Image (tube, helix red, strand yellow):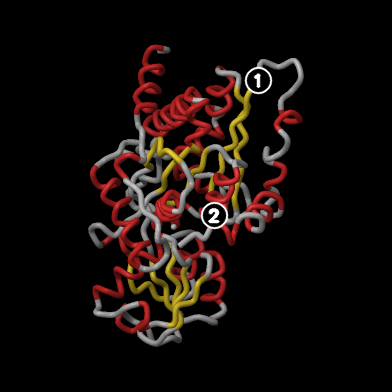
Amino acid sequence: MKKLKKTVLAALVGTFVLSALTGCGGTADNGLVDKEENIEAGSDVTREVNIGFVDTSGSNILLGSEGIARDNGYFEEEFEKIGVKVNLVPMSGAGPAINEALASGSLDIGILGDVPAVNGKANGIDTTVIAFNGLNNFIVISANPDSGIDSVKDLKGKKVATQKGAFMHRLLLYALEEEGLTIDDIEFVPMTAQDALAALETKSIDAAVVQPNDVSYRLAKENGFKEILFSNDHEGWAAGSITEIRTEYLNANQDVAVAYLKAILRANEYIEANEDALKEQWIAAGYSAESYDYAYPLHDNYSKIEATDDVIANAKKTLSFLQENDLSDGDFDVDSWYDLSYYGKAKTELEEGK
């Protein structure tokens, strides 16, 4: 097995946070309540950590290493050792919702895409990256079979939907630029991936730019929708996710970062030892085995943690993308954003415990 998204804070805080944390996919039942109520009397638990993850499905689906760590009980076990109650919070509002929750202090750790993570940091959310999850997110541009679209060039003048400010938006710009086009040459329709695919299926748009998934697979393989570009064929056209922690929280709870990473490392060991673990996880979430091979041809949707040259370069390119496209006017030093010393501590503690 191969080794394994400008957010305007003032406009969103107070509206998006409330809806994301109380009205989306039942997240109010996943730990964002008064901490004193959430810690059982007489237990050894004295602290809490709220970890938010992207779940646009609203079905509490958590894939990859983090999903294995949750489903196998590794998070619970590692946090229990240090007297911490862990609350895993599905965020149907995706990366922007996680940003707002981190800004308000409702979340302590966020697992989100590189674009919203970089955007949040550039706009003043004080976070520290403790894990880079690799570059295994790609895009597919799917076209309505009646649209007359057979190539990226044919997108000119067409209704093209994707999530504004997300990695799909960035890679769409790369695709257009390669063909001598700009965003002004298409009718750009900002939509979440879920809404874009629904609009594509009803043929109310001409094309959708999404991360390959079970729905895009079905549309292409069973319903005759055209795939005019799959970005995994283009070197440098990839994105990843990031695990970040509020710096204020980290300074007071450094052992939480270590415990989190120990759980992820245990999950990765499990994945290495169980070749079909990630595919089985995908199928258990209700998706087809075929769509897993389609979405992750290298079977590599797990956390690689390390700050490799390519993921650092990608974070810097992401910041430039946000600035150049008027999505952010903020700036920060990417090289001082991440601190992988906790990763080293986690590895050492795991080795010593064996």
Quarter residue 276 falls in:
top left
Where residue 231 sits in the image (x, y, percent)? 31, 63
| 221 and 103: which is toward the camera | 103
Say whether residue 353 is visible. yes
Q: Residue at x 56, y 71 (%)?
A: 198
| 346 and 331: which is toward the camera | 331
Q: Which residue is mark 1?
A: 45
Q: What's the amino acid at mark 1?
A: Val
Using the image, tell me which numbered label, if any, was put on residue 71: none
Q: Would you place residue 104 above or below residue 40 in this image?
A: below
Q: What's the amino acid at mark 2?
A: Ala
Q: Quadrant of the N terminus?
A: top left
Quarter residue 176 falls in:
bottom left
Q: Would you place residue 225 above or below residue 233 in this image?
A: below
Tag 2's secondary structure? helix
Say whether residue 284 is visible. no
| Cα gap from disc 1 to disc 2, whole angstroms | 29 Å
Where residue 238 sits in the image (x, y, percent)? 32, 56
Q: Name the N-terminal-most of marks 1 and 2.
A: 1
Using the image, tell me which numbered label, if any, was put on residue 94: 2
Where residue 19 sits in the image (x, y, percent)? 68, 56
In the shown orientation, is residue 259 left or right of residue 339? right
Number of other residues with Cα within 10 Å of mark 1, as a class: few under 14, some 14 to 19, many 20 or more: some
